[in-house]
Image (cartoon, coloured by chain):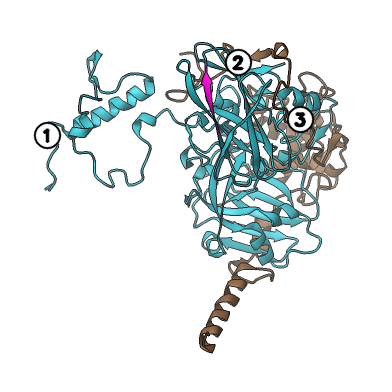
Chain colours: A brown, B cyan
Amino acid sequence: MFSSRKLSLLLGIAAAAGAFASAAEPGHFGYGKTATPAEIAGWDIDARGDDGLGLPPGKGTVERGTEVFADQCAACHGTFGEGEGRFPKLVGGAGTLKNDRPELTVGSYWPFAPTLFDYINRAMPMPAPHTLSADDVYALTAYILNLNDLVPSEFVADRDSLPKVKMPNRDHFTWTDPRPDTTSKPCMNACADPASVKIMSTAEGNGLTPRTTGPLDTMQPK
Amino acid sequence: MSVLPKPAGVSAQQLGRRSFLGLGAALTGGLALGLKPGNAAEPVPAFPPADPPWSQALGPGVVDRPYGRPADFEAGVIRRNVPWLTAGTQSSISFSPLQDLHGIITPNGLFFERHHAGRPDIDPDQHRLMIHGLVERPLILTMKDIVRFPQVTRIHFIECPANGGMEWRASQINSLQFNHGMISCAEWTGVRLSTLLEEVGIKKEAKWVLVEGADGAHMNRSLPLDKCLDDCLVVYAQNGEALRPEQGYPLRLVVPGWEGNVNIKWLRRIKLGDKPWYSREETSKYTDLMPDGTSRGFTWLIDAKSVITFPCPEKPLAGPSLYEIRGLAWTGNGKVKRVDVSTDGGVNWQTARLHEPVLSKALTKFTLPWQWDGQPALLQSRVIDETGYVQPTIADLRKQRGSNSVYHNNSIQTWQVKPDGSVFDVQLA
């Protein structure tokens, strides 16, 4: 038999363990500090794609966007968004999504205009992300939309106008996963006519594979 | 003064040179060990009956390498990239050398990388995790705060959904590493995301969770609240030590069984909302373009997949003999139930042996003995997971999705074995 002192000690440990395992009550642990409105404002940068919730005050014209783009973006994306080297094209590709080689750009593919503001604001320009003013990000957004013929040259981008821009591909996304979309059966024997087993493509000899021994392969002519 | 005797006839300089030569041999591949400088034609045998030089010398002492590293001879076992694939290395990927790994755990230095704005080097004392939005009390946590929460440890894989993405149209890359190396698996330690969300108090209207990184991309994705409360982890340790900077030091999200991109690295912000955010990474990227021009979004699940890791293009066969076919299988649905292996391009199959531990949403190892007679062979593996889902062929996948969907190519890999033992990446009709 446990002494009552031992029993209460055991119950105490059990209660503590239970309390530690479940944090159903907010503030149960009490670690950290409450975030102040000013702290939240500094990091709360998201603008929601479909309705623009979170877009900040400010505005930008296509004309201003032309200047900012030339300074901040054209080196990689090309003066008119055509893309330099392997950096992304920002324009074109309209009507190519069913093609053998589709071109996925802001104009041809992106479903929501506020997402463009959100992305430029959080991730661009690549060498110095999140350093542009809201006005300049709005201006770039207006410029890129205009390059894609989605808004007129007098368009002014702001928190009210951007959610109203109807992107051409907006209604061509499904947001629920239809997989599994294959229903193979795990056949074990004589699953196919051996004569029908044919190699359709091979990676042999096409020169696209970097070396997998020695130091990193730059694949540049030596 | 040293109390240890000096190794007879071997100066530290010579030891250093030997190790340098060893590295050179590893780098050029195939050169015999212990080559005499200036006399390349005459290797010094270091095997029976000779007693090798390392057996007749005193080696470096403890803490010679206070943080250990692989043998110099393993210098070729590294993450590698495909230079032509991306504009630069800052928004790019590297691949784990699966051909040289033997278990279900990826060593921390070899875990695949996917960065969108390079790798930030974050001072953990300055790092903060902010949780706000539709919560009772918005919270800021330091790393010291986070480590105090009840700890959990789980083994899970992370796979980039673009793993194998270069092979949708046809075989392009003759390599296990480059076709399958965007999967790695580690033991993660941290706190359940549900613990943190319960601590701040979830408001009734909250249905979605924005997770965001502290890198230059401010990488962000939307996750359904249900998944966050189910099994997501906020982790600070990887295989028992602090996360590597490339994997999100000091803090990352692990979303078991879901595509790599949602496993936000350098995690700094969690915001609860009533709808998804439709960020760039979940609209213009990480969506799957179908042949009819429509696209699938929010396709987070990693479907069941397997691959033979030996033999492979990097590890050919050395003549007819008895071999052990080895490979890895995994599924975002839970556990691997069975793996079958074919040596004739899928006509006949044999069930491989699964090696313990078989863990949910973790890499699982399989093997099958194989007597190779030197004839041409077409090796394949096919996984079946605990939901009964069967890994499809690339032809099955193309029938459903065409070849422009980039992501989620979980098809059966075919390795062509030629009579000389060389191995090539091929696709069958």
Kindly indicate whether the residues beneath marks 1 and 2 are on one polypeptide chain.
no
Kindly indicate whether the residues beneath marks 3 and 1 are on one polypeptide chain.
no
**Tags 3 and 1 in contact by the CB under 8 Å rule?**
no
Locate residue B12 relative to residue B351 in the image: left or right. left
Q: Amino acid at mark 3?
A: Ser
Q: Residue lying farthest front?
A: A189
* Dot in front, 3 or 1: 3
Q: Position of residue A142 (x, y in %)?
A: 79, 36
* Dot in front, 2 or 3: 3
* Image quadrant in which you'd find residue B375: top right
- Check if residue A217 falls in the magenta segment: no
Inter-mark Cα distance, 3 to 1: 67 Å
Q: Which residues are magenta?
A: B367-372
Inter-mark Cα distance, 2 to 3: 26 Å
What residue is drawn where x is 50% and y is 31%? Answer: B97
Give above or below for A195 relative to B269.
Answer: above
* Image quadrant in which you'd find residue B183: top right
- Note whether residue B171 is visible: no
Locate residue B57 relative to residue B184 in the image: left or right. left
Q: Secondary structure at mark 2?
A: loop
Q: Amino acid at mark 2?
A: Ala
The circle drawn on residue A184 is 3
Q: Which residue is mark 2?
A: A203
Give the overall secondary structure of the magenta segment.
strand
* Image quadrant in which you'd find residue A28: bottom right
Q: Amino acid at mark 1?
A: Ala
Task: Quadrant for the C terminus of chain B, please.
Answer: top right
